[in-house]
Structure formats: structure tokens, C-alpha cells
Image: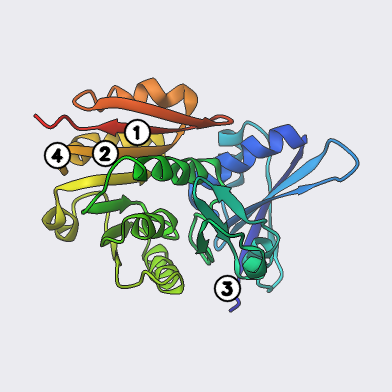
């Protein structure tokens, strides 16, 4: 399906810097796809981000600290084409792949076929892979019966939780497109009946409030929302609940955890500049 018009923001830099700039553009949230085109025999790369509306070039340049160019694209399905170039991802017990990689699934893994469409989350970003690894570790220690994936994107983490614990998982996102993508991906992965996806902002939705308390809550969102939602998140956790937070930089760990002082710090996973935190609510 073609989704015109599309706009491309691009910037040329070194391969090392490309990874960080790509991550910032992904987590900024308005890009529909972000990819890195590397020069095979030189230390150069181009980061390209695709948008359904013309982005503010000055704003993007400020958040990455470099000048970004913005231009319209011709009418092609660039989002699908960019995703077809993504390799599969192994994270913890999970193997995340697209339709073009269906023949490469190894034995002994939990497979997840994810098509991002217009939603964020294919497993290629460090924070998503960190969360999948953390879920794999947590699953070795205990069971969960009431799980919420807050800010679900493609539903990757909700699907992973449903596959691990064979329990119903509630997934929410402020973007109705992400909610539809989550539903489609859940059905494609055989856990459609277990994953309930709803459009909701924060934890204000009656659907989310009525389903509380949660014994596992996953929030792979930016540091700002993690701090703003901290009081509401802590209120909906059951005693002994586990909280998995990501979408934050390693140098933001202390800031974020300072908003969750009622919880016990269990551990952190890091990859490059990104972190995932595991916290636990005391039973008393």
C-alpha cells in the first residue's frame, strides 16, 4: 500500500556517529522509518528518516546537533523498501524478523515476525532489544498474570510477553495506527487472542485503570514521559510487581530512577548509549 506523500530528512556523517543520530531520530517519535546507508569502503554513512508530513528541519537539526536536510520524496512505498533491508535480530530468547527473512529462523528460539508499517519498533533499536533480553531473563525467575505494555508501538514487547507467559497482555499506545499494527502483528504471531491493544494516552484510560494492578509493566518510551508518568505508573503496580523501563540514555538513569524511589532497583542492561532498567515494587 502506498502512503504518499513522504518526506525525507537526511544527514551525512561518520559510521560511528550515524548510529547515535539514527537512534535520536527514532526515539524522537515522528519518523515513520529510519535507516542508515553505509559506504562499504569508507568511514561514511547517510542517515535517512521518512515522514508522512514535512518535518521541521531546524528542530531536527537542534536535537541531533548537526544540520539536517529535508526534501519531498516521489510516490513510492519507501517504508516497506527500507524495512526489507533490515536484518533479523536475536535478542535474548527471541528472534525478530520480517517477511523477507522467513526462511532464516533458527531452531531453539521464540520467533516473532514483525512488520512495522507506520509504527515504531522492529527490534533493531537498542532499547527494544534490551527489553527483549530483560524479558528473557525475567521469565527464568517468575511468572506474570497481568501485563501492560505502555507505548506499545508495533506490539513487539507485548507479543514477546504473551509468548513467554501464555497470558493475556494489555498493550496501549497514543497512536491509533500503532494500535492497529499491534493487533495485526499479534494475529500474525499466533497470539491475537492474548494481546488486547487499545488507544490511550498515558494511564488515564478507564480500560487501563480498570485492568490494574499489573504485576509486570513495560514502558519503552522516552525519559521525559517516564518521569512524567512515574506517579501514575507506581500507583497501578501490584505489590511485588516488576517494572521494565527503557527508551532512556545511560546518563539519564539516575534522573529516571529518582522518580521511582518507592521501588527497588533490580538491575540495568546497556547497549551503546542506551539503557533498560528493571525495578520492583516492595510486597509491603
Seen at 64% across and 62% down, the residue is 83
Residue 243, position as x, y percentages in the image: 29, 38
Q: Earlier in the sequence, mark 1 or mark 4?
A: 4
Which label is found at residue 242? 2
Q: Secondary structure at mark 1?
A: strand
Q: Earlier in the sequence, mark 4 or mark 2?
A: 4
The Cα–Cα distance between marks 1 and 4, rounded to whole angstroms, is 17 Å
Q: In this orientation, does residue 221 appear?
A: no
Label 3 or label 1, whichever lies nearer to me, is 1
Residue 115, position as x, y percentages in the image: 54, 66
Q: Earlier in the sequence, mark 3 or mark 1?
A: 3
Residue of label 3? 3
Q: Quadrant of the C terminus?
A: top left
Which label is found at residue 235? 4
Seen at 70% across and 38% down, the residue is 18
Q: Nearer the viewer, residue 46 or 90?
A: 90
Q: In this orientation, does residue 76 appear?
A: yes
Residue of label 1? 278
Looking at the image, do the residues carrying marks 1 and 2 touch, with CB atoms under 8 Å apart? yes
Label 3 or label 4, whichever lies nearer to me, is 4
- Please determine whether, in this image, residue 204 is positioned above or below residue 185: above
Relative placement, left or right, of 178 versus 7 is left
Q: Quadrant of the N terminus?
A: bottom right
Q: Nearer the viewer, residue 131 or 109?
A: 109
- Please determine whether, in this image, residue 281 is positioned above or below residue 204: above
Looking at the image, do the residues carrying marks 2 and 3 touch, with CB atoms under 8 Å apart? no
The Cα–Cα distance between marks 1 and 2, rounded to whole angstroms, is 7 Å
Label 4 or label 2, whichever lies nearer to me, is 2
Amino acid at each position: 500500500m502506498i502512503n504518499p506523500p513522504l518526506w525525507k530528512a537526511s544527514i551525512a556523517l561518520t559510521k560511528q556517529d550515524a548510529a547515535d543520530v539514527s537512534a535520536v531520530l527514532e526515539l524522537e517519535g515522528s519518523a515513520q522509518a529510519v535507516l542508515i546507508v553505509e559506504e562499504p569502503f569508507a568511514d561514511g554513512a547517510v542517515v535517512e528518516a521518512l515522514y508522512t508530513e514535512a518535518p521541521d528541519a531546524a528542530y531536527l537539526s537542534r536535537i541531533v546537533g548537526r544540520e539536517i536536510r529535508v526534501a519531498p520524496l516521489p510516490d513510492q512505498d519507501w517504508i516497506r523498501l527500507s524495512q526489507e533491508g533490515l536484518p533479523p535480530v536475536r535478542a535474548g530468547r527471541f528472534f525478530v524478523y520480517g517477511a523477507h527473512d522467513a526462511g532464516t529462523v533458527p531452531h531453539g528460539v521464540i520467533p516473532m515476525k514483525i512488520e512495522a508499517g507506520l509504527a515504531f519498533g522492529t527490534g533493531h533499536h537498542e532499547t527494544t532489544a534490551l527489553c527483549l533480553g530483560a524479558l528473557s531473563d525475567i521469565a527464568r525467575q517468575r511468572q506474570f498474570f497481568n501485563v501492560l505494555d505502555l507505548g506499545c508501538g508495533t506490539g513487539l514487547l507485548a507479543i514477546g510477553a504473551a509468548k513467554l507467559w501464555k497470558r493475556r497482555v494489555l498493550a496501549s499506545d497514543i497512536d491509533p495506527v500503532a494500535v492497529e499494527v499491534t493487533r495485526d502483528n499479534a494475529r500474525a504471531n499466533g497470539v491475537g487472542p492474548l494481546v488486547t491493544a487499545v488507544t490511550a494516552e498515558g494511564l488515564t484510560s478507564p480500560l487501563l485503570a480498570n485492568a490494574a494492578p499489573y504485576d509486570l509493566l513495560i514502558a519503552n518510551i522516552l525519559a521525559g514521559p517516564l518521569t512524567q508518568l512515574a506517579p501514575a505508573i507506581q500507583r497501578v503496580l501490584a505489590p511485588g510487581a516488576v517494572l521494565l523501563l527503557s527508551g532512556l540514555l545511560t546518563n539519564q538513569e539516575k534522573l529516571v530512577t529518582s522518580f521511582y524511589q518507592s521501588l527497588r532497583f533490580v538491575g540495568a542492561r546497556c547497549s551503546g548509549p542506551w539503557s533498560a532498567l528493571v525495578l520492583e515494587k516492595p510486597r509491603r
